Image (cartoon, coloured by chain):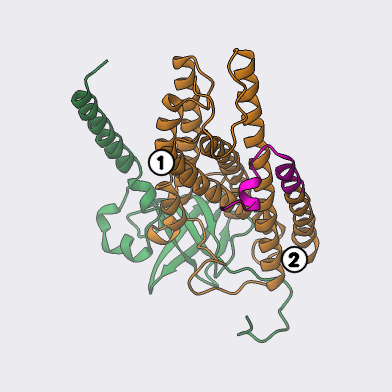
Chain colours: A orange, B green
Amino acid sequence: MMRTSTVELTVDSPPGAVARRTTGWIGAGLAAAAGLAGGLLAPADAVQGPAQRLMYLHVPAAWVAYLAFAVVLVAGGAHLLRADAHWDRIALAATEIGVVLTALTLATGSLWGHLVWGAWWAWDPRLVGTALLFLVYAAALALRRALAERAGVPPHGDPRVTRPVAVVGIGGFLLVPVVHFSVRWWRSLHQQATFLAPERPPADPRMALALLLAVAAASVCATWLLAHRVVRLQRQLDAAGAAGGRRPGRSGPRRPAPVG
Amino acid sequence: MIRRPGRLALLVVLLAGGGLLITGALRGTLTYYRTPGELLTHPAATGERVRLGGEVVPGSVRHDGGLVLFRLSDAGHEVPVRQRGMPPETFREGEDAVVEGRLGTDGVFDADHVVVRHGNEYRPSAPAPEPPDAR
């Protein structure tokens, strides 16, 4: 039995609630540490000045967006294979988080670009790719709503809605490596990776620590948010099922949710 | 509702069309800028609006009224640039920059837009007391 805390995290049960609360506190602690490290401990960059501190928002937002889309890939695949509505709810929550974080990546990147490059936007492969990533996953959310409205069912829990959306979510992941490696494959205005580069270019260790803490904080906070969102979606569906006269299915991770 | 083979064919056509449109639109994106070497070996590009990227040659920056004059270099090739308007504050000699404009018949690149292309190295502004090869 694989009943680890990572599975419990999205289950509407007392141990699940405890796991979520613990995750929330760890995330808050890491976020506070990252704020202190990024704002006070890390020095301002020699070339870019204080604008470089945007890195501690921009890079975690981008990385956790990739991570969220990886969750969409895995959860979407699991949903198609097992026809389990719980996986679809995880994919839905991860898509929402990924879309918001991609928007945040574009916003912080735009500001950083304005301050350092001297341009809010450039038609550069990395920037265009990130915008496409945002559009694809926003389209997945729109498709879910459109299909649900046409079928007259809730936006999650019905395979007529969730299966095509899972396919879009899985296909969209093809863009993630393209976006990540765009700065290596093509000529770009955007700088290359520093900490994930094959040969690490020099970086101040205090800056590296601040970035590491910020990425960890963003990952844990996003996990916490995802778990809460999944539980909420499940409760919504249960409430709708009860109101519609159906059996209020307390759908666990192994049981498919009531199908309308 | 269109039958399955028809729907599949339609999907393939739509995807192929979309792909063509995207690659066409992205041609300028995938080669975001040209290097001085490429610009000099393809004189056909003279008069065409392009982006040119390279290192701002140290010691080459001069201010002349509303114009900023400098040279961009890459792999031994250099192109003189005449930039109209102020470059961003981060514009420095020895850093990379990308300019947008046209190569004039006099061999000077007339630019009206310049962006700074910074590297992926991060260090504090104070001179680092550690040895240069420290991790």
Name the residue located 59 percent from the left edge and 65 percent from the top edge.
Answer: B92
Residue that label 1 marks: A81
Residue type highlighted by circle 1: Leu
Residue type highlighted by circle 2: Ala
Name the residue located 43 percent from the left edge and 58 percent from the top edge.
Answer: A181
A150 or B39, nearer to the observer:
A150
Name the residue located 60 percent from the left edge and 12 percent from the top edge.
Answer: A245
Vertical comparison of B78 with A162: above or below: below
Q: Is mark 1 on a helix, strand or loop?
A: helix
A156 or B68, nearer to the observer:
A156
Q: Is mark 2 on a helix, strand or loop?
A: loop
Vertical comparison of A174 with A136: above or below: below
Question: Residue A124 in magenta?
Answer: no
Stretch in magenta: A1-21
A66 or B96, nearer to the observer:
A66
Name the residue located 38 percent from the left edge and 62 percent from the top edge.
Answer: B35
Residue that label 2 marks: A42
Q: Which chain carries label 2?
A: A
Q: Mark 1 lies on which chain?
A: A
